[in-house]
Image (cartoon, rainbow, N blue to C red):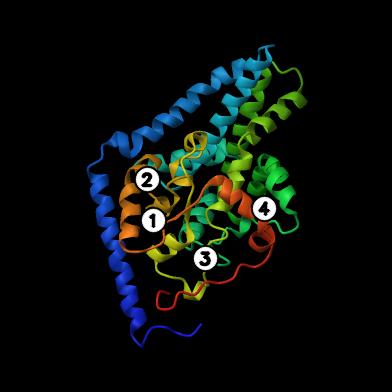
Amino acid sequence: AEPMQPAGGAPRQSAGAEALLGELEARVQEVVRASSWWERHGVDCAILALSLLALPPGFLCLRSDSPLVFALGITILGVCHYTLTVKGSHLATHGALTESRSWSKVWMLFFVEVCTSFTAECAKHGHVKLHHGYTNVLGLGDSSTWRLPCLNRYVYMFLAPLLIPIITPLVAVERLREVELRTALRTLGLISLGLYSQYWLLLNVSGFRSPGSALACMLITRSLLAHPYLHVNIFQHIGLPMFSPDKKPRRIHMMSLGVLNLPRLPVLDWAFGHSLISCHVEHHLFPRLSDNMCLKVKPVVSQFLHEKQLPYNEDSYLARFRLFLQRYEEFMVQTPPITELVGLQ
């Protein structure tokens, strides 16, 4: 593209972008400072605690001969699983559950390795350092790990999510080659603890009589919200502007252009967290804020971006679903085109 700024325009644009981000940060920090501990951390910790407390009733419901009570048990365990593995792991990876570094490490190991069956170090590197540091930058934070060009649109959108519970620990084991032996042994131990605990509880508390039925139940509960989990991860970045590593825009432009909010959806808000659903733009701008705080600063961020005539992407789940079915080849198979913002890189 031909340059649209005169010489010296880019530095001025860069300084302007930093000033904009600084102004937005000041407004958001004002809200954060005026918020109580309950608002900053307590609400989300309570949701996670309730999810842990709901597990025993869920396992006990599976003992029932009533189809409705059994289905209730599956639903409780499935929703709790995603609340702990998605919401819990996401907040813990960003250090948003507590202001203590030591406890942040403990919670990250618990939620990512014990509950999610993944590697904490790889999760933090891939999500925090790459995805957040280089949002929609090709080859770095472009969500390409979610692309499977070998699958057609219907297999990918409807069947592939069911494999997530199986693929996740397998990928974790493969990634252990990248970490120290001590870390690999710790990760294997914690992942095994999480998987075996659920298996043991299904046999000894829920009353399953065969290993096969217990494993099938584990797969069902861990797949309950797999479809929206996969869909949300692609809807909110893919199909939006992508950037070249050597010409990426400044942070405020990168996040306002390359991130999209979905509307509030009660079940997903609870299980995935506001920062992954209706406040994803806010989360990418301020990743250390908890879900509840992202929701609280949402009006401030949206008003600011609209004031400054910057993009604030929003769309419905159904609209994005239809769009991806219609343009699956373009979004999920072909290499995305690079967006160049002259003077803003």
Report, in whole angstroms, how far the alpha carbon at label 2 lies from the one at label 3. 23 Å
**How many neighbours does mark 3 have within 10 angstroms: few (below 14), some (14-19), or many (20 or more)?**
some
Which quarter of the figure has residue 151? bottom right
Report, in whole angstroms, how far the alpha carbon at label 4 lies from the one at label 2. 30 Å
Inspect the image, locate mark 1, and give the three-letter code of the amino acid beneath it: Leu
At mark 4, the secondary structure is helix
Inspect the image, locate mark 3, and give the three-letter code of the amino acid beneath it: Pro
Residue occupying image coordinates x 40% and y 46% = 95
**Residue 41 rendering spot, x and y as whole percentages:** 35, 37
For label 2, the residue is: 294
Residue 260 visible to the viewer: yes
Out of 18 and 194, give the one closest to the viewer: 18
- Considering every residue shown, the one lying at the far top of the view is 65
Report, in whole angstroms, how far the alpha carbon at label 3 lies from the one at label 4. 19 Å
Residue occupying image coordinates x 54% and y 29% = 80
Which quarter of the figure has residue 222? top right
At mark 2, the secondary structure is helix
Report, in whole angstroms, how far the alpha carbon at label 3 lies from the one at label 1. 17 Å
Which disc is residue 285 wearing? 1
At mark 3, the secondary structure is loop
For label 3, the residue is: 241
- CB under 8 Å between callouts 4 and 2? no
Report, in whole angstroms, how far the alpha carbon at label 1 lies from the one at label 2. 10 Å
Q: Is residue 9 rendered to the left or right of residue 164? A: left
